[in-house]
């Protein structure tokens, strides 16, 4: 679940950036950052439910 969410976020953000005219390398970097943020959010929600 975590890996799937991270990869889909990376792909979606990269494609949206490319759609708005951002260069490929910059779009890839923005997508990677969004992937890290999404993975952190999903991980924190998963561990929060496990603690309760």
Image (cartoon, rainbow, N blue to C red):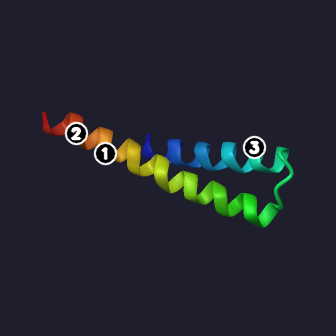
State the residue lying farthest toward the left.
Answer: 52
Picture layout, residue 45 above or below residue 14? above
Residue 27 coordinates in the image, percent (x, y): 74, 58
Q: Is residue 24 above or below residue 19?
A: below
Per the model, the C-alpha gap separating discs 1 and 2 is 6 Å
Q: Going from the N terminus, do you reach mark 2 or mark 3 first?
A: 3
Residue 51 place in picture, x, y as percent: 14, 39
Q: Residue 16 carries which label?
A: 3
Q: Residues within 10 Å of mark 1 (few under 14, many from 20)?
A: few
Residue ID for mark 2: 48
* Dots 1, 2 in contact, CB < 8 A: yes
Q: Position of residue 8 (x, y in %)?
A: 60, 42
Q: Is residue 39 left or right of residue 16?
A: left
- The residue pinned by badge 1 equals 44
Would you say 15 lies left or right of 9 here?
right
Given residues 19 and 4, the one toward you in this image is: 19
Name, please, the residue furthest toward the bottom. Answer: 25
Residue placed farthest to the right in the image? 21
Please determine whether, in this image, residue 36 is positioned above or below residue 44.
Answer: below
Which residue is painted at 39% across and 42% down in the image? Answer: 42
């Amino acid at each position: 679940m975590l890996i799937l969410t991270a990869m889909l976020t990376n792909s979606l953000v990269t494609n949206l950036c490319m759609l708005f005219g951002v260069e490929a390398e910059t779009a890839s970097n923005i997508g990677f950052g969004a992937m890290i943020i999404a993975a952190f959010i999903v991980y924190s929600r998963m561990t929060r439910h496990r603690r309760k």
